[in-house]
Image: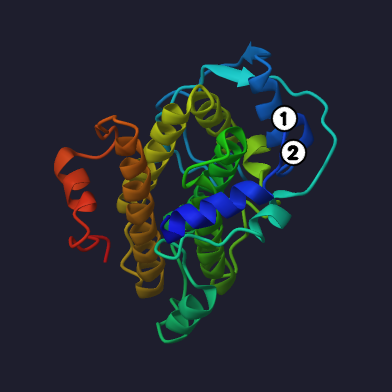
Amino acid sequence: MNRRDAVVAGAAGVAVAGSVGTAYLGTGWARDLASLLRGSLNFMPSIGAGVGRPSLPTFGDGRSPALGAPSLTAVPSPTATKPIPTAHAFLATVAPDPESAISARALQAELDHLPLADMLTYDERNDLQWMRAEENLARDVYLALFLRWGKGPFAAIAASEATHGDAVRQLLLRYDIADPAPGPEGASATDATFGGMYREFVTNGSKSYIDALRTAANVEELDIRDLRNRRSTREDVAAVYHHLEDGSRVSLRAFVKEIERQGVTWVPSYLKSAEFTAIMDQSAPSPSK
């Protein structure tokens, strides 16, 4: 058993035993997943490929985001569930994947030696807010999928995604930008923009273990594509985006390798074949910096 398997196995022991009704990992999304597993579904309008950025006061520049592609099909209907441990408490017991996690202390030391821009543009501020919410979305989806299947790299990578969201938050604090996702772990389920994506990803990933892995690989591909669409010439912003993409590349490799262990060949959905091949080649440097 390698280190990552040991981490996930240990997390499985800590994670809730029994049915979803006895496991609560954050506000809102455990209810969604509990309904899904019971097969109680209703239907909601689709997100559509042309969805704009988050409908928050500081968002809404009208551009079509890279992560807005999935269309919503079935959405779990909310049902009551008794609160048990929060996702925050659960994540505190899980060691992040050491290859994809971002050290807050090391990042802050790096940012302290980089120039502070006098002012970020409107688009740059929106991009940071979008990436903050998107990293939290990945965290919440992986937590839900770990709760559903209790195995695989989901728990350790969810913990790493939490460090990614925190990395973007360091830039938000640095430039006094409102945090669009200050809520607890699991809050993506009720977010005005990301809630639909969250429910679709969890719905698809709850069909089977291999579907969960495929969903996670898609999330990582979308994250990488989104980061590349939001490259910045600001040294500090570019540094954080570089670390985020490096982490996503590691996570994508982990999910694809687990897919292959199930005897399935992964075909990239959102990345070009050459881009995907370069990512799977661990010696290839990230092009984001």
The answer to whether one can see residue 65 in this image is no
Residue 39 location, x and y as percent?
65, 14
Residue 85 location, x and y as percent?
78, 48
Q: Count how many numbered circles sit on residues in the image.
A: 2
Q: Amino acid at mark 1?
A: Ser
Q: Are marks 1 and 2 in contact (CB under 8 Å)?
A: yes
Looking at the rendered image, the quarter that the N terminus falls into is bottom left
Neighbours of disc 2 within 10 Å: few (<14), some (14-19), many (20+): many
Q: Helix, strand, or loop for circle 2?
A: loop
The residue nearer to you, when weighing 121 against 130, is 130
Position of 94 with respect to 214 (left or right) is right
The structure residue drawn at horizontal position 43% and vertical position 39%, both measured from the top left corner, is: 216
Numbered label attached to residue 19: 1
Residue 223 location, x and y as percent?
39, 46
The answer to whether one can see residue 123 in this image is yes
Which residue, given by chain and number where applicable, does mark 2 sit on?
A: 23
Q: Is residue 185 above or below residue 199?
A: below
Q: Helix, strand, or loop for circle 1?
A: loop
* Picture quadrant of residue 237: bottom left
The structure residue drawn at horizontal position 46% and vertical position 32%, both measured from the top left corner, is: 212
The residue nearer to you, when weighing 80 against 256, is 256
Q: Amino acid at mark 2?
A: Ala
Between the residue at mark 1 and the residue at mark 2, the CA separation in whole angstroms equals 7 Å
* Picture quadrant of residue 189: top right
Residue 182 location, x and y as percent?
67, 55
* Picture quadrant of residue 144: top right
Kindly give the residue lying farthest to the right in the view shown. 82
Position of 103 with respect to 55 (left or right) is left
